[in-house]
Image (spheres, grey):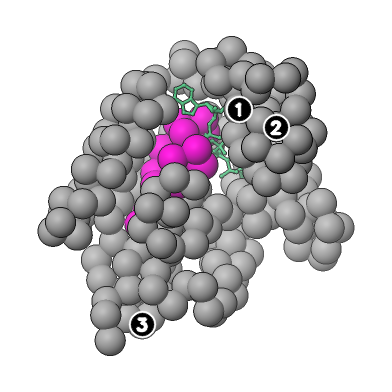
């Protein structure tokens, strides 16, 4: 059996994890697993999980490790994860990273390719308050840096562009604080395992994609 591949994109809110994950997952032929997207879907559908996580997400704090791990384990049972997956926004805490190591080990995955997308806090606020997302296909835009051709309308499928409820200045500052407190230490965790790649994500979207493509090709010995 070929080794299953796991890619992990670390980085602060607004670093471009989602933007790049869509491109790189497609290139690698693996599903893009965003814990944030999974939870927003649960909120939109009004499920039990959605009712619990909605207020937490809106406060800018992290959802409990227990709920997140359960959700990820369920998702990994889906057949599309048979050859691997790309995690975006997960793991976010040390217990999540340790839990994921066990899952990858049990699931026959090879060593993960972990990329830390680094951007300074001052740039992130502009990225996040300017973000708009297509309500149909999920394409990500930015009203300052990468606007759609027609205001409020997705170039790809004509879907309405919406602003995330947690992209206000106030919530963004909470999300950044949670990132520095709970997620940034994961870089050291993966550095110690010898699997961390650090990347300057303040470059343009295409430049970051090219750098990521090079990281993936190197990791796969291509
Ligand atoms: P989540 O949905 O994961 O959000 P996040 O990590 O805060 O990251 P974002 O989605 O905001 O940013 P991104 O890095 O994907 O940037 P994007 O590509 O969109 O989490 C939301 C909440 O869910 C959390 O606060 C928490 O409550 C909960 N949660 C989720 N996972 C959890 C977990 N594992 N554990 C516990 N709780 C969890 O880009 C942003 C903008 O910048 C866009 O407008 C884009 O066009 C623009 N942009 C991107 N790249 C560039 C570039 N290179 N140059 C210029 N602009 C760029």
Describe residue 59's horizontal placement relative to residue 111 as left or right. Answer: right
Kindly report which numbered mark, 2 or 1, lies closer to the viewer in this rendering.
2
Specify few, some or many for label 2: CA neighbours under 10 Å numbering under 14, 14-19, or 20 or more. Answer: many
Q: Residue at x 52, y 33 (%)?
A: 13
Sequence order check, earlier mark of 3 and 1: 3
In space, the residues marked 3 and 1 are separated at their CA atoms by 38 Å
Secondary structure type for disc 3: helix
Specify few, some or many for label 3: CA neighbours under 10 Å numbering under 14, 14-19, or 20 or more. Answer: few
Q: Which residue is mark 3?
A: 106
The reply to whether residue 153 is in sight is yes
Q: Which residue is mark 1?
A: 141
Q: Residue at x 55, y 67 (%)?
A: 72
Q: Which residues are magenta?
A: 7-21
Q: Is mark 3 within 8 Å of ligand 1?
A: no
Residue 76 location (% of width, % of height): 51, 73
Specify few, some or many for label 1: CA neighbours under 10 Å numbering under 14, 14-19, or 20 or more. Answer: many
Marks 2 and 1: CB-CB under 8 Å?
Answer: yes
Magenta stretch: residue 9 in it? yes
Of residues 85 and 11, which is closer to you in this image?
A: 85
């Amino acid at each position: 059996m070929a080794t299953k591949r796991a890619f992990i994109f670390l980085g602060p809110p607004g670093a471009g994890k989602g933007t790049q994950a869509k491109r790189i997952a497609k290139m690698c032929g693996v599903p893009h697993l965003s814990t944030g997207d999974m939870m927003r879907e649960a909120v939109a559908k009004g499920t039990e999980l959605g009712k619990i996580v909605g207020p937490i997400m809106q406060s800018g704090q992290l959802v409990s490790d227990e709920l997140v791990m359960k959700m990820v384990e369920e998702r990994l049972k889906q057949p599309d994860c048979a050859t691997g997956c790309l995690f975006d926004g997960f793991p976010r805490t040390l217990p999540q990273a340790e839990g994921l190591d066990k899952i990858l080990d049990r699931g026959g995955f090879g060593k993960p390719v972990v990329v830390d997308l680094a951007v300074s806090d001052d740039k992130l606020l502009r990225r996040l308050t300017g973000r708009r997302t297509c309500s149909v296909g999920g394409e990500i835009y930015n009203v300052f840096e990468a606007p759609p051709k027609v205001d409020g309308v997705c170039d790809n499928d004509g879907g309405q562009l919406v602003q995330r409820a947690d992209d206000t200045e106030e919530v963004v500052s909470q999300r950044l604080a949670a990132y520095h407190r709970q997620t940034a230490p994961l870089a050291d965790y993966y550095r110690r395992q010898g699997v961390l790649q650090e990347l300057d994500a303040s470059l343009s979207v295409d430049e970051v994609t090219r750098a990521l493509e090079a990281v993936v090709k190197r990791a796969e010995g291509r």
